[in-house]
């Protein structure tokens, strides 16, 4: 089966940079996705990697290394509103996704 | 453009009862997937429907079932409810497979509490 590991919780300071790691033991997936989920709300799509390398979208970047079984989400210039859970997920054929348990990020002033 | 709509938002049921949840995808999206989210297990894939056919299935017991209608609206049903079925049930729609790059758009979920 899929083994997806993320840190349970992280704390960072407003204005700082934080890196949320996702390691996995799976193969054959189509893409790796990162979602943000605020408490009590639906997950929202942040970023997507198909090939190895870095994808940048404003303050958010995501990196994938298939050979190392490793991905990370980088958040720059942290804002209080970035306090949320961040989920990494693997997508297989026809919209079958496997999600990690998520990392709860606490941003402090 | 309307998002993914799930009804009802909240539901309280008694053990042994059955429940039906509804999901209306974004217009034009033909794929609808269902997930169960609990604090302990995170987001777990239930099943995915595309053009009225179940295309993918997760590892849940047969008490969990679903269907999709010709207008792409989907329902999921849970029979003989157990306390452990208390969770947030999320549906997500997509206009193509995951390789499309946009992933899913999730609805706000139905919070089911079994007492």
Image: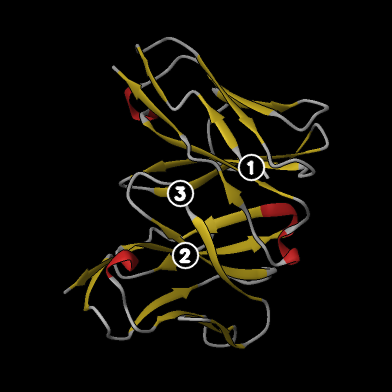
Q: Nearer the viewer, mark 2 or mark 3?
A: 3
Disc 1 and disc 2 on one polypeptide chain: no
Residue B7: x, y in percent? 53, 25
Which residue lies under the disc numbered 3?
B43
Local crowd at mark 1 within 10 Å, few (<14), some, or many (≥20)?
many
Residue B23: x, y in percent? 61, 31
Secondary structure of residue under mark 2:
loop
Point 69% across, 42% down: residue? B26
Point 27% across, 83% down: residue? A15
Foreground of the two, A92 or B103: B103
Foreground of the two, A75 or B35: A75
Q: CA distance from mark 3 to mark 1?
A: 12 Å
* Up/down of B96 relative to B46, above or below: below
Secondary structure of residue under mark 3:
strand
Point 48% across, 40% down: residue? B108
Residue A106: x, y in percent? 23, 67
Are dots 3 and 1 in contact, CB under 8 Å? no
- Residue B33's disc number: 1
Which residue lies under the disc numbered 2?
A3
Disc 3 and disc 1 on one polypeptide chain: yes
Secondary structure of residue under mark 1:
strand
Residue B71 falls left or right of residue B87? right
Q: Chain of mark 1?
A: B
């Amino acid at each position: 089966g899929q083994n997806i590991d993320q840190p349970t919780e992280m704390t960072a300071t407003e204005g700082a940079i934080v890196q949320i790691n996702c390691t996995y033991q799976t193969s054959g997936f189509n893409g790796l996705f990162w979602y943000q989920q605020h408490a009590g709300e639906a997950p929202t799509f942040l970023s997507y990697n198909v090939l190895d390398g870095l994808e940048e979208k404003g303050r958010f970047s995501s990196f994938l290394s298939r050979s190392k079984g490793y991905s990370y989400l980088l958040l720059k210039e942290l804002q209080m509103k970035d306090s949320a859970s961040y989920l990494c997920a693997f997508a297989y054929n026809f919209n079958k996704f496997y999600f990690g348990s998520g990392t709860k990020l606490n941003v402090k002033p | 453009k309307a998002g993914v709509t799930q009804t009802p938002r909240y539901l309280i049921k008694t053990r042994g009862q059955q429940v039906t949840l509804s999901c209306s995808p974004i217009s034009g999206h033909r794929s609808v997937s269902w997930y169960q989210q609990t604090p302990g297990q995170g987001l777990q894939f239930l099943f995915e429907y595309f053009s009225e056919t179940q295309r993918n299935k997760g590892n849940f017991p047969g008490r969990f079932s679903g269907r999709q209608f010709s207008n792409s609206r989907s329902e999921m049903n849970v029979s003989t409810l157990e306390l452990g079925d208390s969770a947030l049930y999320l549906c997500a729609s997509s206009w193509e497979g995951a390789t499309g790059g946009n992933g899913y758009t999730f609805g706000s979920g139905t919070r089911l509490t079994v007492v």
